[in-house]
Image (spheres, rainbow, N blue to C red):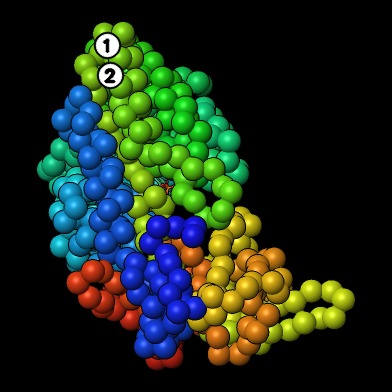
């Protein structure tokens, strides 16, 4: 089997010990199923790897854009991770969930004055400042509110993690952060240091997503620590936090690359300690911001088949009751997924077909070229695996389709974590 948490019993697909066909019947489809135990296991794996770093303030910060609703923030808080937030919506959700906001990191390349006020009023611990204007605005607003705001400064180390352009953000010409190479990052650091209402703690970068190469973070750390040294030499300021962002990849399909994350973190933290010493710097706290690798493999999406269209001599389509509204990732990035029949998992899968959604859009494809049992037909249950990241959080109401429910399963039971959007929810804001 592809993943440890999946197995087939009596011809049906089970995830974390649950019969997925039963869940589909019980809660309706489309349905996001998320395993709380898996999320916790992923958090703990980061926590224990970062917990053995030389600097005791090291730790993981969950990038909540990957999957954001109240129950997720509660789990993350219980596991002791921080949370990245990128909008007032994410801040509000975390706040309402009781998340300890001093562990929240406010990201983003355009925070409005209103966003800044909202974040300060809700006690956000750190701002990850992206640009000169934000430094000025944040200093001004923090002054008005009589606080000294802790910040990290986001810089671009010029590292290309060998991924698609859409998910590569550490390059010099990125819209995020200020470039080290051009000298602008040093200027921004000097500006931040000069501001009396800002308390610069360190520097942040995020080189991109779906990182599988074991040297990506080490190369980023090398450039970043060189920058720590330049800042120290030219200003006397010693940074104490090195935040290398997110991006470890996860396995979406058989034959894809894999990375041993704890082993990679161990190697990385050893490198950071050695390099800092070489440069005559104190060993900084190492922060990582995993999003996908915390939630992706904790999620499965379930659909019900509506039609199987066999266009003789051309191709076959299996149409389901969801689509790009609940999973836009194939449309956006041609992302690959593993698709399986849930109720006929024991049958041989020898019918090749595209799994397509119900939206009025030919590009509404969940995954092309999937293999299904020959008997697949209306009413059957299909599972798309590894959908815990960037599915619910990227879902839309295109064609006025409501977002699916999220059911959270765990060893101890199951509960609805997010309700299914109703027709009345869809017209709630219309006047
Ligand atoms: C998206 C993002 C992350 C998380 O990336 P994953 O690939 O989901 O791990 C972390 N930090 C920042 C700043 C991001 O933009």
Q: Is 407 displayed left or right of 55 in the figure?
A: right
User: In the rendered image of this protein, does residue 231 appear above or below residue 259?
Assistant: above
Q: Residue 343: x, y in percent? A: 50, 81
Q: Which mark is residue 156?
A: none
Q: Is 315 displayed left or right of 108 in the figure?
A: right
Question: Circle 2: is it few (<14), some (14-19), or many (20+) Cα within 10 Å?
Answer: some
Q: Residue shown at 26%/76% (left/top)? A: 414
Q: Residue shown at 24%/48% (left/top)? A: 44
Q: Is 17 displayed left or right of 373 in the figure?
A: left
Which quadrant holds residue 173? top right
Q: Is mark 2 in CB contact (under 8 Å) with mark 1?
A: yes
Label 1 sits on a secondary structure element that is helix
Which quadrant holds residue 99? bottom left
Q: Residue 375: x, y in percent? A: 65, 84
Label 2 sits on a secondary structure element that is helix
Q: Residue 31: x, y in percent? A: 43, 78
In the displayed image of the protein, which residue is found farthest to the front? 10
Residue 186 shows up from this direction: no
Residue 407 shows up from this direction: yes
Name the residue beneath numbered marker 2: 273
Q: Residue shown at 40%/39% (left/top)? A: 260
Name the residue beneath numbered marker 1: 277
Nearer to us in this view, 415 or 237: 415
């Amino acid at each position: 089997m592809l993943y440890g948490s999946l197995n087939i019993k009596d011809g049906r697909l089970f995830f974390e010990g649950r019969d997925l066909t039963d869940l589909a019947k019980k809660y309706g489809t489309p349905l996001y199923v998320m395993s709380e135990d898996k999320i916790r296991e992923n958090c703990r794996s980061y926590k224990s790897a970062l917990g053995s770093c030389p600097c005791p303030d090291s730790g993981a910060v969950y990038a909540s854009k990957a999957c954001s609703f109240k129950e997720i923030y509660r789990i993350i808080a219980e596991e002791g991770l921080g949370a990245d937030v990128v909008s007032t919506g994410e801040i509000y959700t975390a706040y309402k969930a009781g998340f300890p906001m001093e562990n929240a990191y406010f990201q983003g390349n355009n925070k409005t004055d209103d966003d800044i006020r909202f974040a300060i009023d809700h006690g956000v611990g750190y701002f990850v400042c992206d640009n000169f204007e934000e430094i000025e605005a944040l200093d001004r607003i923090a002054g008005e509110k009589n606080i000294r705001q802790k910040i990290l400064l986001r810089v671009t180390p010029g590292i290309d993690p060998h991924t698609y352009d859409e998910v590569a953000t550490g390059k010099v010409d990125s819209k995020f952060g200020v470039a080290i190479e051009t000298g602008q990052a040093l200027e921004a650091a000097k500006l931040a240091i000069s501001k009396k209402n800002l308390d610069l703690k360190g520097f942040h970068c995020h080189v991109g997503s779906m990182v599988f190469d074991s040297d990506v973070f080490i190369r980023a750390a090398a450039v970043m620590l060189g920058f720590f040294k330049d800042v120290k030499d030219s200003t006397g300021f010693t940074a104490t936090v090195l935040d290398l962002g997110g991006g470890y990849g996860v396995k979406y399909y058989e034959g894809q690359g894999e990375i041993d994350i704890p082993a990679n973190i161990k190697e990385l933290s050893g490198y950071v300690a050695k390099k800092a010493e070489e440069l005559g710097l104190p060993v900084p706290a190492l922060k990582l911001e995993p999003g996908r690798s915390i939630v992706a493999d904790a999620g499965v999406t379930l659909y019900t088949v509506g039609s199987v269209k066999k266009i003789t001599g051309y191709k076959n389509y299996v149409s389901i009751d969801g689509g790009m509204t609940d999973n836009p990732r194939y449309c956006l990035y041609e992302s690959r997924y593993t698709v399986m029949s849930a109720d006929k998992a024991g049958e041989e899968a020898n019918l090749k077909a595209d799994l397509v959604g119900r939206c009025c859009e030919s590009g509404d494809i969940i995954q092309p070229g999937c293999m299904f049992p020959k008997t697949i037909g209306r009413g059957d249950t299909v599972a798309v695996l590894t959908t815990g990241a960037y599915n619910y959080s990227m879902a839309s109401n295109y064609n006025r389709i409501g977002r699916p429910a999220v059911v959270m399963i765990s060893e101890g039971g199951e509960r609805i974590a997010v309700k299914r959007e109703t027709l009345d929810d869809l017209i709630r804001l219309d006047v």
